[in-house]
Amino acid sequence: MPGSIPALSRLPRVDGWTLGILALAALFTSPVLAVLGIALENSGDAWAHLASTVLGTYISQTFLLIAGVGAGVLIIGVSTAWLVTLFEFPGRSVLQWALLLPLAMPAYIAAYTYTDVLEFAGPVQTGLRRLFGWQGPGDYWFPEVRSLGGAVTFMSLVLYPYVYLLARAAFVEQSQNLWDAARGLGLGTWRCFMRVGLPLARPAIAVGVLLALMETLNDFGTVDYFAVQTLTIGVYRVWFGMNNAPAAAQLASMVLALVLVMATLERVARGRRRYQFSQNSPRRHPLARLRGVRGTLALLTCATPLTLGFIVPAGLMAASAVGTYGSSTGVHTLTLAFNSLAVAVLAALVCLCVGLFLAYGARLSGTALVRSATRVASIGYTVPGVVLAVGVLIPSAALDNAIDGFMRTYFHTATGLLFSGTLCALIFACTVRFLALSFGSLEAGLTKITPNMDAAARSLGHRPGGVLARIHLPLLRSSLLTGAMLVFVDAMKELPMTLILRPFNFNTLATHVYEYASYEAFEQAAVAALAIVVTGLIPVITLSLSFAGSGRFSRPAKTAS
């Protein structure tokens, strides 16, 4: 029909890159869809049992945990970012990059370390009893480490860099003209910050808090060790304790809904407001010098979270590692390190390949369909690891059973487990979880390459694959390295997915630390814990040093009054 030709011409062109991106989007969203599909099945009387026992506790403690951590990272991250961005005080040049170091400290390792020192039988309380002659808990009060408050404290201390990083970047980008106009209206430094600086930085701060809360929901080791009954713990216990897949999937769906609600609330609160910074103001912000008591208070405000979130736990782990290290420990740790490295390297390589395909395919097509598919494919980073593990394990087990049944029926041979309970399932789950890290890094790198280079190469007869190999890959070396490091470090310290999906008798550094901490023998795993932290330091220090040199703020011009 003549009228159908224009309609067909408006359809997006479908090529191999587009089909590949759509297929990858379907593959990497399949765990989430599997959870939602299984959640529709009948869970029997599991919900009646949960509702009458622990469901209320799961929900209330989850909300209390994210509320406490959200408030903690907001206060610490914004206050430290404001101080190091606008003021000069003793130690600022070091603190502005060192404040990112707690990113290398997994929350569960910090929790294990502090508990080992602060619990009733630990050196701190034992020393207090000897010093003051106390006999037991009835003679004195000491805060309970293994509690909801303890979990909030330790998570806030290691997750605040998400807010600090984005808040400081937002403060750096703000125009000096806005601050001058506010001061011209009679506002002091504090009121300028509250009325101008903080509102303009709100989107970046909200994203930082949201990232920290997603990591909070993903945490398993800390809440399990502290007996905090969250929805994440509920998914794990219903799956392994009650052996009820539909009920576990239904709890997992509640976690997914919570993540979606948090992201939606942030967008609704923002509304139609737009936050833009002037790019035409070359004037640099003068740093106000803080002296005396104010300088000391600024130093303590910034140094305290760094000390408690990284220096103290790292020092305690190093001391324990030196005291417990032996020949057998060294051999065992090398085996665990090899397993962790294998998982992390494979996950990084797969994420890089998939992320590069998605980012370059989106560059070639540029259609709304392809862009949406790439965003959907990288949605796994917002999903807690326990939920992803359930979404990978149940379908892969069903697939294994189907293949095994087919082979038994027609070929009289058993195939066993091909996917579930193997390294394939674990690497796939890590790829789904961390793909956003590699994709984001490569997408940002490709935006810096002018499209004219693509056009020039295509005019010389190169196909898209050739352009990628000969032009883009050499220019993307730093982006490839950044993406690989981010995925590598996160995979090294990943606990819940590894704990659920690992092959039989396969341990990593993270699972080894978790098991020994469960046996109240964390000091025996101090070497493995320290190895995880040292590995995480590599990209964090790289990011910190590059971040320290950024910004438009000049050296001190005046003394704050």
Image (tube, grey):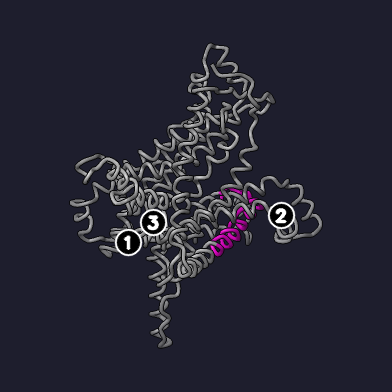
346 inside magenta stretch: yes
Three-letter amino acid code of the residue under disc 3: Val
When asked about the image quadrant of residue 502, the answer is: bottom left
* Inter-mark Cα distance, 3 to 2: 36 Å
Q: What residue is at 44 percent from the left and 50 percent from the top?
A: 316
Judged from the image, the secondary structure of the residue bearing numbered disc 3 is: helix
For residue 21, side relative to residue 110 (left or right) = right
* Up/down of 5 relative to 397, above or below: above
Three-letter amino acid code of the residue under disc 1: Tyr
Q: Which residues are magenta?
A: 345-371
The image position of residue 456, as x and y in percent, is 79, 52
> Which label sits in the foreground, 1 or 3?
1
Disc on the earlier residue, 1 or 2: 2
The image position of residue 496, as x and y in percent, is 40, 58
Q: What residue is at 74 percent from the left and 55 percent from the top?
A: 471
Judged from the image, the secondary structure of the residue bearing numbered disc 2 is: helix
Disc on the earlier residue, 3 or 2: 3
Q: What residue is at 72 percent from the left and 52 percent from the top?
A: 475
| Main SS, magenta residues | helix
Which residue bears the numbered disc 2?
472
Tag 1–tag 2 contact (CB < 8 Å): no
Which residue bears the numbered disc 3?
387
Classed neighbour count for the residue bearing mark 2: other residues with Cα under 10 Å, few (<14), some (14–19), many (≥20): some
Three-letter amino acid code of the residue under disc 2: His
For residue 31, side relative to residue 474 (left or right) = left
